[in-house]
Amino acid sequence: MSSTIRMSVPLILVTLSATLQVRSGIMDLGCEGMMIAGAVFGVLGSYLSGSAWVGVLFAVVFGALFSLVHVFLHVTYKVNPTISGMSVNLLASAVAPLLVMLVWGRQTLSDKVPAFGKIDVAAIGKIPIFGKVLNEQTIFFYLSLVLAFVMWIVLFRTTIGLRLRMVGENPKAANTIGINVVKYKYIGTLLGGALAGLGGAALSIGQLDMFIEGMTAGRGYIAIVINAFGRFHPFGAVVGSLFFGFFDSLQMVFQGVLIPSQILMMMPYFFTLLVVSFGLSRSSSPAGLSKHHDI
């Protein structure tokens, strides 16, 4: 169970990013690039400052900056969202190894940097059954749960959330009643980028203490599937990510068993394929996804 939760945390954060973007009417295809940016700049911030918390700040800021590319191209210049989203992914995939090369002199991985350790709270450890498991997690686990709850409150219990969801469902109607559609799309995407960047930091300075090229392993794309599987809901993002994290953790559970490592590595993506094949037929994205209010 501990490994399941640990593997799920970065996914929860990046899926929450996808949820917020889709709810604001922006297709969530740039999550992978935002996550890569968060991972590499999180390590850079921790390296330059000697503080993992500064690394988190770097990850959030640069995740949002990379998301700005996506929303600027799509909303302001009406670029196809597939092109604008993939451009973010390609940009981050190119910037990350270049940055590692410039700072550490090699392309594939950085030096070790200050990172977050496991939280050990005596009161948590006394919780029956789950205490030991919860004490083996980093701050990112608790942060992901808090952010999911906060997102649920904002989206479904506040006027701001209602307006953002209306922009995602029917941008023309939202514009007609005076809602600034462009502003809400930018807000949803920038906050989503910050969450994806935080998910990247959960990998590089949460699970590890360095950046390794390819460490996101397509989690940004998988988050798109989990987001739809979870019905574009913050709590669905948490549950779906835990499911995927379970399959991802099987690699460690069966390590050393006479099962080819390639099969174990394939399990999370096989689960994703099953979800795409059988689980998304009933999923309905917001009606105004990728639509403009002035066209």
Image: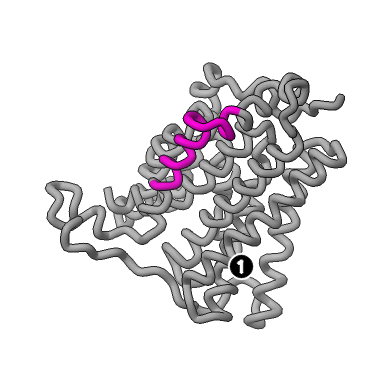
Q: Nearer the viewer, residue 287 or 175?
A: 175
Quadrant of the rendered image containing residue 177: top right
Q: Is residue 122 above or below residue 268?
A: below
Magenta stretch contains residue 16:
no
Q: Is residue 282 above or below residue 147?
A: above
User: Residue, x 71% and y 24% (percent of image)?
Assistant: 174
Q: Nearer the viewer, residue 274 or 101?
A: 101
Please state the horizontal and vertical placement of residue 93, each as a whole percent of the image: 69, 59
Please state the horizontal and vertical placement of residue 194, each as a whole percent of the image: 59, 53
Q: Magenta segment, which residues?
A: 146-162
- Residue at numbered disc 1: 41
Magenta stretch contains residue 160:
yes
> Disc 1 residue type?
Phe
Please state the horizontal and vertical placement of residue 242, each as a whole percent of the image: 38, 41
User: Residue, x 66% and y 28% (percent of image)?
Assistant: 168
Q: Is residue 260 left or right of residue 280?
A: left
Quadrant of the rendered image containing residue 170: top right
Q: Nearer the viewer, residue 283 or 248?
A: 283
User: Residue, x 43% and y 63% (percent of image)?
Assistant: 206
User: Residue, x 61% and y 24% (percent of image)?
Assistant: 285
For disc 1, the neighbor class at 10 Å (few under 14, some 14 to 19, many from 20) is many
Quarter occupied by the C terminus:
top right
Quadrant of the rendered image containing residue 169: top right
Dominant secondary structure of the residues highlighted in magenta in the image:
helix
Q: Is residue 146 left or right of residue 45?
A: left
Whether residue 158 appears in this view of the structure is yes
How many labels sit on residues?
1
Q: How is the image coloured?
A: one colour
Whether residue 273 appears in this view of the structure is no
Q: Secondary structure at mark 1?
A: helix
